[in-house]
Amino acid sequence: MAPVTMQSLLAIIERCVAHRVRLFTILFVVYGLAGCMAAAVLMPPFANIDEGVHFVRADAISLGGLVGVRQSASSAGGIIHRKLRLVIGTIHPIVSDLNKRIDWDTENRTFAITWDVRSDQGSSSIGYVAFPTTAFYPPYSYLSDVVGILLGRAFDLTIAATLLLARAVGSITYVAIGAFAIAGAGEAAPLLFSVLLLPTAIAQGGSASQDSFLFALAALVASLTLAGLRDQTLVDRRRMLVLCVAIGMLVTARPPYLPLAVLPLLLRGQTIWLRLACSLAIVMVCILWSTLMAAFVAVPVVVEGGVSDVPHQAVQLLLHPVSFVSLVVQTLGSTAYRKYVEFVGLGFWWLPHEYYVAAGCILVLATMLCMVSPHRGGWWPQSAAMLGVIGSAAALIFVACYLFTRPDAPEIVGVQGRYFIPLALLIPGVLPAIPMRDKNLLALPLAVIALFPIISIPTLLYAVVWRFYLAT
């Protein structure tokens, strides 16, 4: 019986390894829904990074304000429900202070505020509110939030309950797009699986933030691109169209990702002229949207130590590029680990130091597994171009943040670790393909990656409960 049992075990292992992409897709749906939904419920209202200003933007869109409005030289925003500001104002002093916790009184007061048609004084409950940091974002980034808001108002839910509903809709959207991306990622599935289930990704996926949609969209872009690099016959016109639309939506929401417009050129499934037209179309759409927003919506915003002066910083960048490079090096030298912490788990208070070490090992392991491929030709012809795309997009992130940094700042401010998550998903396109005869050797590392969220997600949820609810 022992040889038969061992043979059966080996057969199961071989079958799991052969169908690892399908298994990772199924596991992502289970982990993703459980993690995002739990985070959506446990996280206090507007406690996620920048969730308040994003939800305000979504409320303006739900009232018909598809584009933000510049009311004056220093104010840009739109028409929203005024009581939304009351909810944010009630909870913000607590969630923004590491020494404070949520009590039942605050929770009850927060969840008691409703969407009133008329305010207590009899005046209109809607009016203009400034939200300059999100006024210029495209409306499609907030589709799930808008659906949640419309449903919440239709069922007469309170504002906080509507936020939970919007988070739930966003979680389902995040998991659905992410699962589709993993299913088509091939050898890159372990890395997409690992990155999309990081605490940062789970927390943002279960939030009413633009990042929930952008992370999933970036995974879809990575999946379609890496599939095209792996097997050129997969890139038919339909896939190319989906890829171009996804990249266009991503770069208009975050212009520093504009180098991703080069990706269609790397896929030789279509003629060079069609690929060139696709790339140019993405660039033109991004430039057009950014120009219109800069001309009619964008205003100076408050930054650390003062107000942004984009024209001055742009001139400085053109006249003194060496100083900019020096500032980037200085910024990385003093904040590199902090950026990694933000990439993995949002902030130092979230998770223990040991977790960040373990998560880093999982990411390295998942990246190495991406190189195991039956395609002997590998991806070498496109590796340099892909590396250039990732590197130039990372550089533009620093450029964009530099433009909003005060002139005398000692380092570039505003560079968030989560901004690099979409770029990390493209790393398999830089790596060579390494054939492996005995695929059963992959069983153990694949199992470690597949089981890590069992530790990762509860650790995140406990950190949320400890941070916001447990007594100090």
Image (cartoon, grey):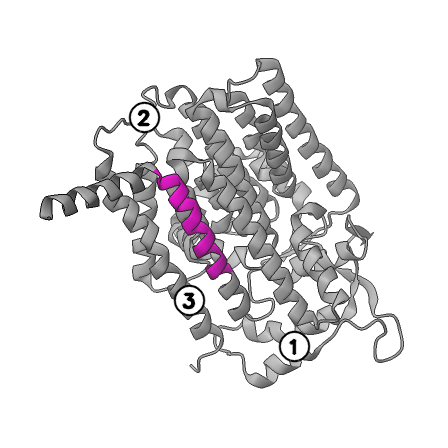
- Residue 451 x, y percent position in the rendering: 32, 54
Measure the C-alpha gap from mark 3 to mark 2.
Answer: 42 Å
Q: Which mark is residue 255?
A: none
Q: Residue at x 78, y 69 (%)?
A: 82
Q: Nearer the viewer, residue 349 or 170?
A: 170
Measure the C-alpha gap from mark 1 to mark 3.
Answer: 26 Å
Tag in front: 1 or 3 = 1
Tag in front: 3 or 2 = 2
Q: Nearer the viewer, residue 362 or 393?
A: 362
Going from N to C along the chain, the mark reached first, 2 or 1, is: 1
Q: Which mark is residue 349?
A: 3
Task: Specify the amino acid type for callout 1.
Answer: Phe
Task: Specify the amino acid type for callout 2.
Answer: Pro
Task: Specify the amino acid type for callout 3.
Answer: Trp
Q: Which mark is residue 111?
A: 1
Is 300 displayed left or right of 194 in the figure?
right
**Residue 151 lies in quadrant:** bottom right
How crowded is the residue under tag 2: few (<14 C-alpha within 10 Å), some, or many (20+)? some
- Residue 366 x, y percent position in the rendering: 33, 42
Residue carrying label 2 = 374
**Segment tinted magenta in the rendering:** 19-36
Q: Residue furthest front?
A: 1
Q: Please tell me whether residue 321 is drawn above or below residue 26 in the rendered image.
A: above
Tag in front: 2 or 1 = 2
* SS type, badge 1: helix
Q: Nearer the viewer, residue 280 or 434?
A: 434
Residue 111 seen in this snapshot: yes
